[in-house]
Image: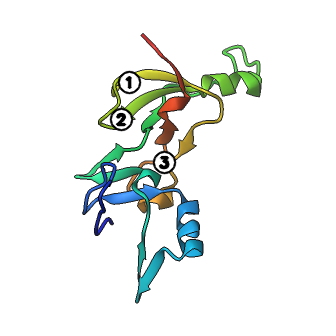
Amino acid sequence: EVVGVGGNAGGVQVGDIAMFHFITEQNCKNAGTMETDGDTRYFYIQADRVVCVMRGGELKPLNGWLLAERAEKAAEKTEGGLEIPTAYRKETDRKFKVIAIPDDCEDIVVGDVIYTQGDCDRVLQPNEFFSIAPQSVFKIEIKDVLAVEV
């Protein structure tokens, strides 16, 4: 939980539950920007390292990230029973439906179906929001969106 913000908070507010990559936690430990007070740990994190926050019961992406769910599940077999090669399934896996965008996003809106570069989607891990976020939600950098379906 965010307990304080500095000058350029990048959209992060006191009271938000902030999600950042686990490597950020390790970097804080290594750089000495983490303090402990009993069982409580305090991290001093640059706002641009925050991927999204939980605010008012909703996930809100920040800093060039959006949240999406798979638009369709890749079929493993055809109706006739032929197995579809993994390479083709990977192409189908690059299609997502946007469920949340940052406030400054102008080219993509919630509900858009997008196509991304390969291997750019990262599932929100259950531990990142203490099982608050569904495991079917992906974080995708906006720069990795190749096209929006019309």
Please report contact status of discs 3 and 2: CB closer than 8 Å, yes or no. Answer: no
Q: Which of the 4 image quadrants contains residue 75?
A: top right
Q: Earlier in the sequence, mark 1 or mark 2?
A: 2
Q: Residue type at mark 1?
A: Ile
Disc 3 crowd, CA 10 A, few/some/many (<14, 14-19, 20+) = few
Q: Residue at x 35, y 36 (%)?
A: 100
Q: Which of the 4 image quadrants contains residue 122?
A: top right
The residue singled out by tag 1 in the image is: 108
Q: Earlier in the sequence, mark 3 or mark 2?
A: 2
Mark closer to the observer (1, 3) = 1
- Name the element at disc 1: loop
Please report contact status of discs 1 and 2: CB closer than 8 Å, yes or no. Answer: yes
Q: Residue type at mark 2?
A: Ile
Q: Alpha carbon of mark 1 to alpha carbon of mark 3: how far?
A: 23 Å
The residue singled out by tag 2 in the image is: 101
Mark drawn on residue 136? none
Q: Earlier in the sequence, mark 1 or mark 3?
A: 1
- Name the element at disc 3: loop
In the image, 75: left or right of 102? right
Q: Residue at x 44, y 38 (%)?
A: 64
Q: Which of the 4 image quadrants contains residue 132?
A: bottom left
Q: Residue at x 46, y 42 (%)?
A: 137
* Quadrant showing the N terminus: bottom left
The residue singled out by tag 3 in the image is: 135
In the image, 105: left or right of 92? left
